[in-house]
Image (tube, grey):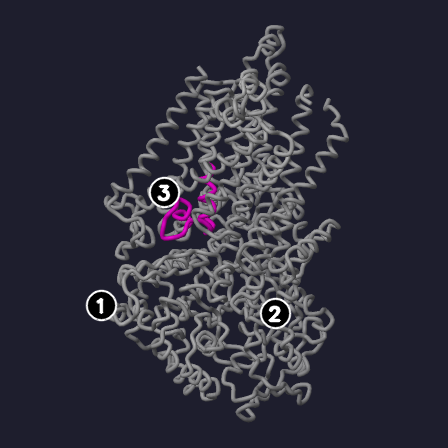
Amino acid sequence: MKAIIANRLALVGAIITAIVLAGVIVGPWLSPYSPTDADFMALLDPPSGSHPFGTDSFGRDVLTRILYGARVSLTVSISGVLAGALIGTTAGLVAAYFGGWWQAILMRVSDLLFSFPSFVLALFLMVVLGFGVVNIAVAIALIYAPIFARLSRNMAVLVKDEPWVQAAALMGQSTWSIITREILPNIAAPVFVQVALAVAFGIVIEAGLSFLGLGVQPPNPSLGSIMADGREYFSRAPWVLTLSGVAISVALLGLNLLSDGVRDLMDPKLRARL
Amino acid sequence: MDEHKLSRRAALKIGAGAAALAGLPWMNSSAFAADELRAGIAGFNVINTLDPAKASLVPEFLVIYGAFNGLLKFNEKMEIVPDLAESYTVVDPTTTEFKLRKGVKFHDGGEMTAEDVKFSIERLMDEKFASPNRGKVTAISAVTVVDPYTVRITTKAPYAPLLNYLTNTRTGTQIVSRKAVEAAGAEGFGRKPVGTGAFMVKDWKSNESVDMVAFDGYFGGKPAIRSVKIPIIAEESSGMTAILGNQIDLTSTAPFADVPGLEKRTAEVTVLKQPGLNTRYFALNVKKAPFDDVHFRRAVSMAFDRNVLVKAAIFGEGVAIPGVLPPSLWPEGKGFTSEYTTFNPAKAKEEMAKSKYGAGTEATVIIWGSNWWRRTGEIMVGMVNQTLGTKFQLQAMEFNAAFAKAKAGDYDALVFGWLGLVDADEYLGEILGSKGFRNIQGYSSPKMDALLEKARSEMDPAKRRQVYREADMLAIEDMPVLPCFCSNVHNLVRPNVKGFSQLPYSNFADQFAKMTVG
Amino acid sequence: MARAISIGRVSSRLGGVALLALLGSATVFFVMRAGQGDPAIAVLGDQATPEAIAAFHKKWMLDDPLVIQFWRWLSSAVMGDFGLSMTVAGGTPIMGLIGSRLPNTLFIGAYALVIAVSVSLFAGTISALRHGKFTDTAATSIAVLGISMPDFWLSYVLVYGLALGLGVFPSYGFTPPAQSLTGALYSGFLPALAIAAPMAAAFTRILRTALLETLYRDHVRVARSLGYRDAFVFIHFVLRNALIPYVTVIGLQIRYLLGGTVVVERIFGIPGVGALMVDAAFGRDYPLVQACALTFLLSVLLVNFVVDLICAALNPRQN
């Protein structure tokens, strides 16, 4: 019963995510419009047959902008999260396996990053580093690295003492091969779920930063920068903010349902240990 | 709970609903007192000092206007009229004598005399004090007290901008109480200003709000409004939602995009607007490729349409301008056209052919600030690339970083602008003069400097304007900046608030004295 | 009930907090200084003449070596003196600035937390008890929708829908709780809701799963078969166990919650530490950024500490 519900939700999530991904990957090719070239004859046209989502203050097709923008947002979020996962998981594994000073230092750094409110950390980094996609990805990576570090360390500490890992060590397997062959596969699943969740939050962070004008460089769109634009002339062209907002919600919905469903299918206890 | 339901139903009934909020408990009664004004400063977030000599940011002056007076001020026709001075006479080309109003009281009760005038201006002149407004008074050689109500200002040479620089605008020459400054110290005075204005600063929560109360000793009579709450609203759009929701009565700005929509909502809000005293342009670094070539600069200038900027960046809330000066400073208000600042793709390409650079030339245009302001850069870059086949790129930064780069000369092109300046010398002299501190372009032309010098010492206003016209034309020839447009100034006022006269330099608190809240 | 937490444990924990605060301050300090920008420009704006900039630098001793500046900051900070604001509130003591804003931020944060917790306790319990039925599906779906509304987006929906559309809540402004508690509850509702919605959704999901997991455990079945009333069993055996992961997740979400206040304070004009930090960062008000960052850091650490205490109290067997 429970598995079916979880499955059903996961299925819906997977379908939405697949549609979003397909739109993001294929959509821009299908669109006859450019996401960046202005058309000053078609400023702020309401939704119509030729522009299903209307046009923005540059006369650009909003649907095309959203598809490209989602691509930018997703890329930034995914690369940031993957970088965070890589750094964090490595740090967590090293801390768990070697313990002692390694653990003390790595986990202290991780605690430090973890103690800053996420958006405060992101905003601070943007002001200091300057705007742009790479810096957003760096901010996302730094926000998520400590989560992956904690998760992987806590999991690895448990796995490390399992008899088969002990046996592998006794049989003379190298540290590297023990970490990659014995420990990593056993913590891969929860890390994956965390990645899916983090990608959703990464999109929110990118959008929030772009919304405050700190994000992606124009003329390239991102979901947040389209929303920021749309908010400015909301009273005149409500479709820009509304439709880009709906787009971001749909993308988040898909990712959340998917990660939720997958998580429900796995050992629920892992959350408690997070 | 009942109260809540009631309000809600009433709200729905009258449609706007904001008025119904009056009955709700969170609104303390004073918020709806008929003699309190809630005047929001929108689109800015920091007021750092209220000492006119130290102030530099627009929101600081918006408050200072109400707490202080200058010797002179602008009337509704933008003519210079006496304020703390009763009259003034030009004794000789370098000396002006001011007769002061008698019996003018400072907020602390002390009388304003010639000593205070001398003190205020000499304080500004003091090199060690390093006032950001010092440039306005460097031409002054002496301030002499003739008697307690007469003061003479002597300049090193005939100095035409002097009277403009003594008005209650973004000049810093507002008269402060010598006694209060000496008692409070420079830092303390900035927090607890003592002026002669109709309103006194009562409470001030940094980057949050300023509270003012009426000063009954004001020389213009008791103000009808007894107190003013001035919230500092970071987002311009929040200022608009605040006035629509009846959380404030007056705003200092309005979002360009919302103006047409707001103009239709006459029951809730009145939109005041007029062409402002401001200029928006792209500064070009003439010391660096590719903008070191005058032909290339002209080509770029002809490659984008300023009318499109006005239409798409500021939603028609302004006018395209051919030169650096805003229209209200043009001779007899008449404009001119120049082929170098008119969109003409064919001529632009021709002009580029004369330059060292061609299609594919790269440059980075720095943009900053609010959305519409960035959009100006986005449109310019898009059109220029399309017309000339150049490869210009945009770089968005925040103001602080962008301005630091500009100051260091570490940029190619940068969207820029000044607002609230009242004298032509502040525009042309400071932006294009080789020593002008707003000159971030590295532009230096002996011919321009000679013209500017001539204009500064030309005491006949009509002739002076003609010299500035010449300077503006020369600026277009040399094109160190790409002039773009002059935007409208806006205030939003709730219908029950009367008596606010808008002036093109973005005035604000100076109007509180004659306003009423119905 | 709650097991006494040994003094040694608490003091070692406090030592850790102090160490983190020191590390955090140093990081913020040096990263901020390595970045671009200049506080003098923030104060002088478009009137920044070179002389005025130099005078500003001299006044705030910004030309001294960084290490000396940090030492100066640290030695007075240890004594509880965080110095004066440079650019946001020129020359006013930072302690006063933070002191007057922190209650607002904590109020909005706590308000959001209360909304999120009460909604999730209700929705999570209902959907676990009715699990698989329509109510469950509805609650779960709403929860997922909630998590898909980022706070800044939800804020605008609320401002245009509830505040301006229906006129039931103020579209801007905040009455501080110190001035009027009802006023704060009323004017803080929309901002708190904007932050709470995604949190409530996350909490509901975790509570539902945790409850489902415990509902079918052996000791619960045994308790039921012994004839205890359902409500008794639910509260003493099920809820109590499920609360541990629930409270842990709340602790983890605190940094998102406090992060959310930054955006929402700006949109609704709430004078809080988040909005202050945004202004300070843009204005390069170095000492103020330091102090705000430290405030947030300590708040997160404190909340995590409290969460640990609650978990320890809920589950005496651990430790």
How packed is label 3: few (under 14 Cα within 10 Å), some, or many (20 or more)?
A: some
Q: Residue furthest bottom?
A: B92
The magenta segment: A201-228
Label 3 SS = helix
Marks 3 and 1, Cα distance to the nearest angstrom?
40 Å
Which numbered dot is residue A243?
3
Q: Which tag, 1 or 2, sits closer to the chain's start?
A: 2
How packed is label 2: few (under 14 Cα within 10 Å), some, or many (20 or more)?
A: many
Label 2 SS = loop
Residue topped by disc 1: B346
Query: In the image, residue C191 lies at what x, y percent?
Result: 54, 43
Query: In the image, residue B247 lies at what x, y percent?
Result: 53, 53
Q: What's the residue at 64%, 57% (across, down)?
A: C85
Marks 3 and 2, Cα distance to the nearest angstrom?
46 Å
Q: Between residues A36 and B316, which one lies in front from this camera angle? A: A36
Label 1 vs label 2, nearer the camera: 1
- Which amino acid lies under the numbered mark 3 shown in the image of this protein? Leu
Query: Does residue B42 appear in this view?
Result: yes
How packed is label 1: few (under 14 Cα within 10 Å), some, or many (20 or more)?
A: some
Query: In the image, residue B512 lies at what x, y percent?
Result: 56, 67
